[in-house]
Amino acid sequence: MSFSNLTRRGLIKTSAVAGAGLALPTYLRADGHSGFTNAPTGDTVTLGFNVPQTGPYAEEGLDELRAQELAVQHLNGEGDGGMMNTFSSKALKGNGILGKKVAFVTGDTQTKSDAARASAKSMIEKDGAVMINGGSSSGVAVAVQGLCQEAGVIFMAGLTHSNDTTGKDRKANGFRHFFNGYMSAAALAPVLKNAYGSDRKAYHLTADYTWGWTQQESIAAATEAMGWETVNNVLTPLASTDFSSYIAPVLNSGADVLVLNHYGGNMVNSLTNAVQFDLLNKEVNGKKFEIVVPLYSELMAAGAGKNVEGVIGSMNWNWQLQDEGSKAFVKSFGEKYGRPPSNSAHTCYVQTLLYADAVEREGTFNPCGVVEALEDFEFDGLGNGPVLYRGDDHQCFKDVLVMKGKENPTNEYDTLEIVEVTPRAQVEYPHDHPMFAGGDLGKCNPGA
Amino acid sequence: MFGLEKRDTRLLIIVAIMALAAPFILNPFPTDSAMAQFNAGYPDLMQRFVIFGILAIGFNLLFGLTGYLSFGHAAFLGVGSYSAVWMFKLLGYNIIPGMVLSIIVSAVFALAIGYISLRRSGIYFSILTLAFAQMLFAIAYSDLIGRFFGTPITNGETGLQVYTSDPQYFHNENLPNIPHLFGQEMQSTYTLDVAGWSFDFSFGYYLCAIIMLLTFYLAIRIFRSPFGMMLRAVKSNQQRMNYTGLNTRPYTLAAFVISGMYAGLAGGLLASMDPLAGAERMQWTASGEVVLMTILGGAGTLIGPILGAGFIKYFENIFAKINDNVLHSWFSFMPDGIEDFMVTIIHPFVGKGWHLTLGLLFMLVVIFLPGGLVEGGQRIGRMFSRKKPSDDAADGTTTPAE
């Protein structure tokens, strides 16, 4: 019972409807041009905070959200002002940004590129966000940065440590305050040499995505340069929760150092598995077996508990730092939430302030103005000493902390101690370094 | 009209009006009101509604007609997306080659997977399709093929993106640097402001909507064709058909491939609206979502899957964005103690808890409306119509499969 009775009248009707359908898009062509995407018109400006609230990095994401909320309070002149008082640039006055009250919307990246982009898109298209901040995974950061470039809004990356974010995936509208795998490796190598000697065999377990790959590459290169040998590198899926099957072969590989290129929930689980296998009490090649976690965070250390004791890693910032900026931030964060902030919280807080400051100095929300204000911007008083936002790749350069799991923690937040503050000069690199090559910032995109 | 029965024509016209007027229908609240949180009429979400509608329509052609429950349809969605992004990388940002290739490639995959999986029926078929989909997901997620060739094919967890260094053979200075149709950008949007309301008309959305209407029309024709009749016979009693000497496998395989092509087209469109293909859209949870959409809306009905797709996507995108601040602003008229209490009560159901709300609603629908949202609509319709319908087929705008 097919109905393919083609008639003259039917044909005319069909083509009329089809024609109308095809003509509609051209009719919609007229675009409303207002200079740039989501130019704030009322007396508020909306920022989008896109963080993982579910998935392996959820803990980090929730801490970022706390810090972002605190930053908005400070920008609006509520609370004690936090790091706004210690910031070397005095453009911010505590009356919002350019006199507009700061409002924010939140979204869940689920630590998935697809979901993160959908969430960021809805912030831009529905809520009119002029800036997207946050995230706790480099895969997500790279994806959202690309989206912001296309949409014409500013992306202030949260916790993203992959070389690619400001390397081959760098974008003109994207900025990263956090340090990266190369810097971690450059800071860690001398400390590892002092602690464990220059004749070691390393076995890498690596989270299988852009961050894991680039960090592993950086660490392997830096440790090999000082005489270490890389025995093996095994890639583990990001979604894994049990790493025992990956740890077992380490024992028979002849390696005497295990490098865990893992982060968040992954790292908590893999480190716990490694300790359960009693690796830390083994002797291989006549040397005590050691574990290295190149990228540390307080939340991970708290999650892994006693297992982090003596394990060396690196961090972007830590709440135990004693400069004025860090003290002010820890104080206002602690008063509000009753806990010290993590380094992902710090980076999101700072990024929000830096964005607001750039807008204030340039006098416009236009992304191209913000890019101009941030490129080669030098500042101080935000907890990392003097910092440079390099214009060539939109990467921040600052001191790197080398940390160690504390032997006798006094409370649940006192899990890590600072071993060394590696000066900025030691971790700098040219923007076209082979590990960062192939990228192109392109031109800043103000959107519609 | 269009060679359809009167009833189907009416249904098609209703869907067409819904799709074309979606920017108005989905934005019922003024932009500045507190209820604006529930507006869904922004381009990205509207595109998702119709794209996942296409996916669900295609899934329903298989599940609704033959009763074969495929648990691996997201694989075709992913394959379609990857094909489209590769076309963007190699040829340029015009979406036509990407969409054509995504349909072809997903058809090839569907043919191979269907050829093997359709040797079994029932739960074994579901498990086989699930296994294939998970294999494809694992391959994409760890970029197994890419490692073999030494160049990224799916780019693993990071997802496949277009870079300025890609060849883009047909790209030139005059063309936009984002997906476009012969120069018309997908994201170009005309915003109409009318007294507090703001309506977005996006080119990308209307393109998706027109393609959805075409695929919907095609689905109606398949439902009403002798081929569709044969598929329904497979659902009601495949054994009897085999005994009468009919070989049903070519029919089921054809249905599987058509369904896979629908999914591939949806994947290609998804990549055209947002040029990034991630492996997560192939995961089993994504396959499960398609099944949920179809069952929630009403399996075997024409319009059900579209409703189900819209329902789930609405929850994912709107409820997930309600945070404590929003809750506080809603209840701010109450005294402090009660305000905090209300926020505490509602908190687990919104924001990251949107899965919980969706789960509860899904339970309610399955228990009280086994025929899905369509059955709910029919019941309401029956409540208001005076004549007692004599059979199921004659009353509502839709027809259950059996």
Image (cartoon, helix red, strand yellow):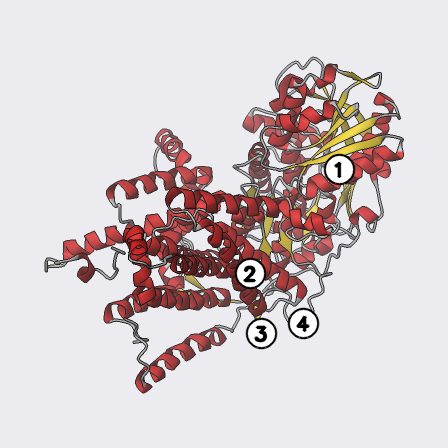
Q: Nearer the viewer, residue B295 or B318?
A: B295
Real-space Cα distance between discs 1 and 2?
35 Å
Tag 3 and tag 2, C-beta contact below 8 Å: no
- The residue sitting at 54% across, 36% down in the picture is A55
Report x, y in % for residue B65: 33, 56
Q: Amino acid at mark 1?
A: Gln
Q: Nearer the viewer, residue A39 or A53?
A: A53
Residue A340 visible here: yes
| Picture quadrant of residue A411 | top right
Q: Earlier in the sequence, mark 3 or mark 2?
A: 2
Real-space Cα distance between discs 3 and 1?
43 Å
Q: Amino acid at mark 3?
A: Phe
Real-space Cα distance between discs 1 and 4?
37 Å
Mark 1: which secondary structure? Answer: helix
Mark 2: which secondary structure? Answer: helix
Marking on residue B215: none
Q: Amino acid at mark 2?
A: Val
Q: Nearer the viewer, residue B339 or B100?
A: B100
Q: Nearer the viewer, mark 4 or mark 3?
A: 4
